[in-house]
Image (cartoon, rainbow, N blue to C red):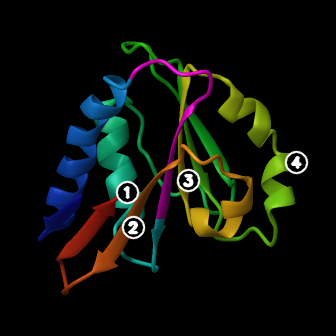
């Protein structure tokens, strides 16, 4: 499914709207994992900010580029935690595994959003939901949800 946005505000709003869809997904044995792929400045973090807002996160959401993983409690949903992961600075999938990635994705009460997910693709499960971000103009973006 392709979605178009023409501003950062619209990209955030799309993330916020997708939060409802994610919360409506049937319970599985593992975390819900969203893998975000796109060039620098394509709207990945902006989308995550909207998604987090839609999930009820009150704190400010910034890219965890230097921390790699940030976690946010989800007190008003059927999920427990939102994990925001940024793989931009990782040199291998093993670095993410060393940070406890397997236990994070093994918990069905977690939602995991991974920026630069293509860098750790080999450790992601086949049921990972991919969202590709494309810059189509100065403020416009296309999101391809696979």
- Above or below residue 88? Residue 52 is above
Which residue corresponds to mark 1?
Answer: 146
Determine contact: label 3, label 2, CB under 8 Å: no
Pinpoint residue 78: horizontal percent, then vertical percent.
Answer: 42, 13
Pinpoint residue 17: horizontal percent, then vertical percent.
Answer: 20, 39
Pinpoint residue 34: horizontal percent, then vertical percent.
Answer: 48, 47
Q: Tell me which corner region of the image, top left, top right, bottom left or bottom right, holds residue 46.
A: bottom left
Q: Earlier in the sequence, mark 3 or mark 1?
A: 3
Based on the picture, tell me whether residue 31 belongs to the magenta stretch. yes
Instruction: Nearest to the eye among marks 4 and 2: give it.
Output: 2
Marks 3 and 1 sit apart, C-alpha to C-alpha, by 15 Å
Q: Which residue occupies 35% across, 32% down?
A: 22
Which residue corresponds to mark 4?
Answer: 98
Determine contact: label 1, label 2, CB under 8 Å: yes
Marks 3 and 2 sit apart, C-alpha to C-alpha, by 12 Å
Which residue corresponds to mark 2?
Answer: 132
Q: Is residue 47 left or right of residue 7?
A: right
Tell me the magenta residue range.
Answer: 26-36
Which residue corresponds to mark 3?
Answer: 114
């Amino acid at each position: 499914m392709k979605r178009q946005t023409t501003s950062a505000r619209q990209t955030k709003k799309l993330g916020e709207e997708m939060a409802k869809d994610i919360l409506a997904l049937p319970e599985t044995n593992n975390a819900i994992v969203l893998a975000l792929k796109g060039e620098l400045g394509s709207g990945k973090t902006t989308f995550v900010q909207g998604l987090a807002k839609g999930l009820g996160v009150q704190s400010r959401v910034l890219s965890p580029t230097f921390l790699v993983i940030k976690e946010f409690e989800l007190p008003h949903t059927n999920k427990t935690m939102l994990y925001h992961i940024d793989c931009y600075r990782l040199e291998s999938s093993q670095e993410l595994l060393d940070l406890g990635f397997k236990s994070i994705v093994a918990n069905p009460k977690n939602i995991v959003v991974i920026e630069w997910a293509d860098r750790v693709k080999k450790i992601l499960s086949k049921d990972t939901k991919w969202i590709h971000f494309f810059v189509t103009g100065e403020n416009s973006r296309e999101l391809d949800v696979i």
